[in-house]
Image (cartoon, grey):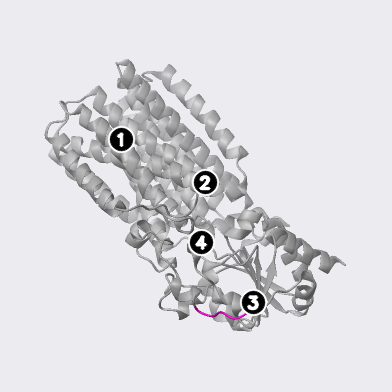
Amino acid sequence: MDLMVAIYTLFIVVLVVFLGFELISKVPSTLHTPLMSGSNAISGITLLGAIVLVGISETPISQWVAFAAVVMATINVVGGYLVTDRMLDMFKSKDQSK
Amino acid sequence: MMELVSYLGYLLATCLFIFGLKRLGSPNTARQGNIISACGMFIGVFSTFIQTGFGGFQLIFLGMVVGAVIGVLAAKLVAMTAMPEMVALLNGFGGGSSLLVAFGAYLVAPQIGVVTASITVVSIIIGGLTLTGSIVAWAKLAGTLPTRPFSFFGQQVLNALILIGLVVAIVMFSMDAVSHISLLYAVITVALVLGVLSVMAIGGGDMPVVIALLNSYSGIAAAAAGSVIGNVLLIVAGLLVGASGLILTSIMCKAMNRSLANVLFGGFGSVSSSSQSDKDQGEVNPITADDAYFVLEAARSVVIVPGYGMAVAQAQHSVRELGDILEEHGVNVRYAIHPVAGRMPGHMNVLLAESNVPYEQLYEMDDINPIIDNVDVCLVIGANDVVNPDALEDEASPIYGMPIIEVSRSQTVFVMKRSMNPGFAGIQNPLFFKDNTRMLFGDAKESLQALIGEFKE
């Protein structure tokens, strides 16, 4: 890895970590579960890496590895977003539920 | 040109993730936030296809269809009470995928520099740990594995040796990545074993912390995999998840007044609780649903304190029904929720939301304790440790210092409990022996139904 790239990456890392802390620290505990499963779905972002990997894989072994990565990440993404949506659908205030 | 388009897509996706997470932070906008975040994911995937020129599209498409079918089925079929284990399991898949991405990237191009090589190993370790750790957490929550902490002689020593071994492996691998593929296989195996060992050692009551932490890990693993494969969106989104998971973990730890190290390595629950069991606790006062009805009917304010027992008995709908009937009788009904009640962060909130309790009626511990002296009846449903006065009074107690919902300060406490068996960690609860406590033994759902029946007569 090029040194400048590494340094730029470090900048991103620091800023994003601060941003993540700021975004989450004030969330009421009512929403902790949907927040967790929603962010869990985002962690399926590794799907993008799996897609890139399939594209550059040449040997059967690496293709299988990449394929398995695509499947697992998609389960995480699709399942994560749907479960979160299902949960949030239930969160209603008094006016909405009547 | 295509490169540029795809990077602009990544930028847009990043913004959508940030907006989405921000909106997830308020009950009114949360659902919209989740959808915004999903749009970000879609744009991210599409931009990646543009970047790779749809290389290997057929295989990817097949994989995504398989994954999507499994994901949809899992999300639609799971019962709300089984939500903690489902979230844990989904999380494990994300970690496993990051492991495979980092490993696959090495298989494709083993000629890597020191930095990339060490990040590859880190990604594999954290990804593997997340995968098996989450599966064990899932099995514990689903009851397939016993929830007791599993510990054996020399466990700490073994964990320490594994960690040292992994550090050595990182150094060796980054010095000379090409010729060390067998080392990488060893690292994968050890990481998978470490995930099993570390979560096995943690008791069921500490699961909220573990799930939040594993969630954070899967984000970090994704970010590391992104750094290996040179994808900036993976780094940004992964770290967002990593940071938010860490915050949640620390909130959970604070709610139990324990350090993260204590949760992970404390072997909580294996400690004998001799200080309490030897003490003479006096007699418990059982009560029948019949008598409880008269007290509840005369009450002006009732606070309901749910715990994991409510989830086990699937009693959330009955709880809401009783709450509604009490409100009709002019009783002020509030629900007090301890931050670590249940098996994942916010577990009780989800269950009560499922049974249509409006979230305005849900109170956090810090809001209910100052007014609890004026409450006529506290109804404790399947909660134990989070209302244990020993946390305030007995310095020898393993949970001493943990903030609790101080139900014993209210006029009367009803405790719905299956039997006198102590809860998780085998800690006896002096609340049950207090003068103003009445025990309503039996299945929580049946007891609630009995109470509801009394009101309807």
- The three-letter code of the residue at mark 4 reads Phe
* Residue wearing tag 3: B284
Q: CA distance from mark 2 to mark 3?
A: 35 Å
Q: CA distance from mark 1 to mark 2?
A: 24 Å
Closer to the eye: label 2 or 3 = 3
* Whether marks 4 and 2 lie on the same chain: yes
* Residue wearing tag 2: B85
N-terminal of the pair, mark 1 or mark 4, is 1
Q: CA distance from mark 4 to mark 2?
A: 18 Å
Question: Residue visible at 42% across and 70% down?
Answer: B398
Chain hosting mark 3: B
- The three-letter code of the residue at mark 1 reads Thr
Chain hosting mark 2: B
Could you tell me if residue B222 is visible in this image?
no
The segment highlighted magenta reads: B279-283
Question: Residue visible at 37% across and 27% down?
Answer: A51
Provide residue B399's location: percent of width, then percent of height: 44, 70
N-terminal of the pair, mark 3 or mark 1, is 1
* Residue wearing tag 4: B424
* Whether marks 1 and 2 lie on the same chain: yes
* Whether marks 3 and 1 lie on the same chain: yes
- What number is the disc on residue B252? none
Q: Quadrant of residue B295?
A: bottom right
Above or below, B7 against A87 in this view is above
* Residue wearing tag 1: B189
Judged from the image, the secondary structure of the residue bearing numbered disc 3 is: loop
Judged from the image, the secondary structure of the residue bearing numbered disc 2 is: helix
Q: Are marks 2 and 3 in contact (CB under 8 Å)?
A: no
Judged from the image, the secondary structure of the residue bearing numbered disc 1 is: helix
Chain hosting mark 1: B
Closer to the eye: label 3 or 4 = 3
Q: Nearer the viewer, residue B225 or B175?
A: B175
